[in-house]
Protein backbone atom coordinates (compact mmCIF):
# COMPACT_ATOMS: atom_id res chain seq x y z
CA UNK A 1 0.00 0.00 0.00
CA UNK A 2 1.30 3.43 -0.90
CA UNK A 3 0.32 6.59 0.95
CA UNK A 4 0.80 9.91 -0.82
CA UNK A 5 1.74 12.98 1.20
CA UNK A 6 -0.87 15.73 1.22
CA UNK A 7 1.16 18.81 2.09
CA UNK A 8 0.77 22.11 0.27
CA UNK A 9 -1.97 23.19 -2.08
CA UNK A 10 -4.32 20.73 -3.78
CA UNK A 11 -3.28 19.33 -7.14
CA UNK A 12 -4.89 20.67 -10.27
CA UNK A 13 -6.68 17.30 -10.65
CA UNK A 14 -8.07 17.62 -7.13
CA UNK A 15 -9.19 21.21 -7.74
CA UNK A 16 -10.91 20.18 -10.98
CA UNK A 17 -12.56 17.23 -9.23
CA UNK A 18 -13.80 19.42 -6.39
CA UNK A 19 -15.27 21.94 -8.86
CA UNK A 20 -17.13 19.26 -10.85
CA UNK A 21 -18.46 17.60 -7.69
CA UNK A 22 -19.70 20.97 -6.39
CA UNK A 23 -21.41 21.57 -9.74
CA UNK A 24 -22.88 18.04 -9.57
CA UNK A 25 -24.29 18.71 -6.09
CA UNK A 26 -25.77 22.04 -7.18
CA UNK A 27 -27.42 20.43 -10.23
CA UNK A 28 -28.72 17.58 -8.09
CA UNK A 29 -30.15 20.00 -5.51
CA UNK A 30 -31.79 22.06 -8.26
CA UNK A 31 -33.23 18.97 -9.95
CA UNK A 32 -31.48 20.00 -13.18
CA UNK A 33 -31.53 16.72 -15.11
CA UNK A 34 -30.14 18.32 -18.27
CA UNK A 35 -27.08 19.59 -16.41
CA UNK A 36 -26.64 16.23 -14.67
CA UNK A 37 -26.65 14.45 -18.05
CA UNK A 38 -23.87 16.81 -19.17
CA UNK A 39 -21.88 16.14 -15.99
CA UNK A 40 -22.07 12.35 -16.23
CA UNK A 41 -19.76 10.58 -18.67
CA UNK A 42 -21.32 8.67 -21.57
CA UNK A 43 -20.66 5.43 -19.65
CA UNK A 44 -20.66 5.49 -15.85
CA UNK A 45 -19.46 2.91 -13.34
CA UNK A 46 -22.66 3.04 -11.26
CA UNK A 47 -22.99 1.15 -7.99
CA UNK A 48 -26.00 1.31 -5.74
CA UNK A 49 -27.06 -1.92 -4.03
CA UNK A 50 -29.85 -3.45 -6.09
CA UNK A 51 -33.05 -3.22 -4.10
CA UNK A 52 -36.22 -4.54 -5.82
CA UNK A 53 -38.47 -2.95 -3.17
CA UNK A 54 -37.20 0.54 -4.05
CA UNK A 55 -38.43 1.90 -7.40
CA UNK A 56 -35.63 4.45 -7.90
CA UNK A 57 -32.81 1.98 -7.19
CA UNK A 58 -31.83 -0.01 -10.26
CA UNK A 59 -28.77 -0.65 -12.39
CA UNK A 60 -27.68 2.32 -14.52
CA UNK A 61 -24.75 3.02 -16.82
CA UNK A 62 -25.47 5.84 -19.28
CA UNK A 63 -25.43 9.55 -18.51
CA UNK A 64 -29.19 9.83 -19.09
CA UNK A 65 -29.97 6.83 -16.85
CA UNK A 66 -27.75 8.14 -14.07
CA UNK A 67 -29.16 11.66 -14.28
CA UNK A 68 -32.75 10.36 -14.19
CA UNK A 69 -32.21 8.78 -10.77
CA UNK A 70 -32.69 12.15 -9.08
CA UNK A 71 -36.05 12.71 -10.82
CA UNK A 72 -37.18 9.16 -10.02
CA UNK A 73 -36.28 9.63 -6.36
CA UNK A 74 -38.22 12.92 -6.29
CA UNK A 75 -41.26 11.28 -7.91
CA UNK A 76 -41.42 8.58 -5.22
CA UNK A 77 -40.66 10.66 -2.13
CA UNK A 78 -42.22 13.65 -0.38
CA UNK A 79 -40.10 16.68 -1.40
CA UNK A 80 -40.63 18.69 1.78
CA UNK A 81 -39.41 15.73 3.89
CA UNK A 82 -36.19 15.16 1.89
CA UNK A 83 -33.00 15.94 3.79
CA UNK A 84 -29.36 15.37 3.02
CA UNK A 85 -26.34 16.79 4.74
CA UNK A 86 -22.70 16.37 3.88
CA UNK A 87 -20.35 16.32 6.85
CA UNK A 88 -17.22 15.22 5.02
CA UNK A 89 -15.98 16.09 1.51
CA UNK A 90 -12.62 14.51 0.70
CA UNK A 91 -10.81 14.90 -2.61
CA UNK A 92 -7.71 13.03 -3.78
CA UNK A 93 -6.83 13.63 -7.42
CA UNK A 94 -9.74 12.45 -9.54
CA UNK A 95 -11.61 10.84 -6.61
CA UNK A 96 -14.04 12.47 -4.20
CA UNK A 97 -15.81 10.93 -1.22
CA UNK A 98 -18.74 12.60 0.47
CA UNK A 99 -20.13 11.30 3.75
CA UNK A 100 -23.22 12.47 5.52
CA UNK A 101 -26.77 11.70 6.49
CA UNK A 102 -29.98 11.45 4.48
CA UNK A 103 -33.65 11.04 5.26
CA UNK A 104 -36.98 11.16 3.53
CA UNK A 105 -40.52 9.86 3.29
CA UNK A 106 -41.84 7.48 0.64
CA UNK A 107 -44.90 9.00 -1.02
CA UNK A 108 -46.85 5.74 -1.55
CA UNK A 109 -46.49 4.40 2.02
CA UNK A 110 -46.01 7.52 4.13
CA UNK A 111 -43.10 5.74 5.84
CA UNK A 112 -39.81 7.47 6.58
CA UNK A 113 -36.23 6.33 6.08
CA UNK A 114 -32.94 7.71 7.33
CA UNK A 115 -29.32 6.86 7.76
CA UNK A 116 -25.73 7.62 6.91
CA UNK A 117 -24.37 7.59 3.37
CA UNK A 118 -21.05 7.63 1.58
CA UNK A 119 -20.74 8.64 -2.07
CA UNK A 120 -17.58 7.89 -4.05
CA UNK A 121 -17.31 9.88 -7.28
CA UNK A 122 -14.53 9.84 -9.85
CA UNK A 123 -14.14 12.77 -12.25
CA UNK A 124 -12.20 12.36 -15.48
CA UNK A 125 -12.16 14.89 -18.29
CA UNK A 126 -14.58 17.10 -16.38
CA UNK A 127 -17.27 14.40 -16.16
CA UNK A 128 -18.34 11.92 -13.49
CA UNK A 129 -17.18 8.44 -14.51
CA UNK A 130 -17.85 6.64 -11.21
CA UNK A 131 -20.85 6.98 -8.89
CA UNK A 132 -20.82 4.50 -6.01
CA UNK A 133 -23.39 5.19 -3.30
CA UNK A 134 -23.47 3.35 0.01
CA UNK A 135 -26.55 4.00 2.14
CA UNK A 136 -28.93 2.44 4.67
CA UNK A 137 -30.72 0.33 2.07
CA UNK A 138 -32.63 -1.66 4.71
CA UNK A 139 -34.29 1.49 6.08
CA UNK A 140 -35.20 2.59 2.55
CA UNK A 141 -36.61 -0.84 1.59
CA UNK A 142 -38.70 -0.96 4.78
CA UNK A 143 -40.10 2.51 4.02
CA UNK A 144 -41.10 1.35 0.51
CA UNK A 145 -42.86 -1.78 1.77
CA UNK A 146 -46.59 -1.29 2.53
Image (spheres, grey):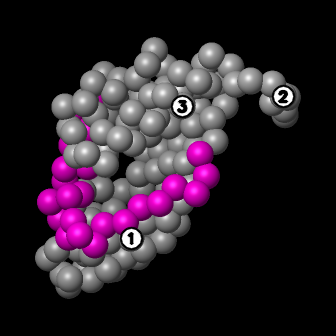
The answer to whether residue 100 is magenta is: no
127 versus 75 height, above or below: above
Among numbered discs 2 and 1, the one appearing first in the sequence: 2
Quick one: SS at disc 2?
Answer: loop
Quick one: SS at disc 3?
Answer: helix
Label the magenta part by its dominant secondary structure: helix
Alpha carbon separation for disc pair 3 and 2? 17 Å
Q: Position of residue 143 (x, y in %)?
A: 30, 78
| Residue sticking out furthest to the front | 9
Q: Residue at x 31, y 22 (%)?
A: 42
Q: Mark 2 highlights which residue?
A: 7
Q: Are marks 1 and 3 in contact (CB under 8 Å)?
A: no
Alpha carbon separation for disc pair 1 and 3? 24 Å
Write the start and end of the magenta stretch as one range.
63-89
Among numbered discs 3 and 2, the one appearing first in the sequence: 2
Q: Mark 1 highlights which residue?
A: 103
Among numbered discs 1 and 3, the one appearing first in the sequence: 3
Q: Position of residue 129 (x, y in %)?
A: 43, 27
Q: Quadrant of residue 67?
A: top left
Q: Position of residue 31 (x, y in %)?
A: 22, 46
The answer to whether residue 65 is magenta is: yes
- Image position of 112 (left or right of 99): left
Alpha carbon separation for disc pair 2 and 1? 36 Å
119 versus 85 height, above or below: above
Q: Mark 3 highlights which residue?
A: 18
Amino acid sequence: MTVKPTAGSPSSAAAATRAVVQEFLAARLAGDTERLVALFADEVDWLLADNPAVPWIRPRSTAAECASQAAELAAHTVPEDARASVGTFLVDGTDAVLMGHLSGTVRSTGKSFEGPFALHLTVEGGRVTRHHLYENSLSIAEACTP
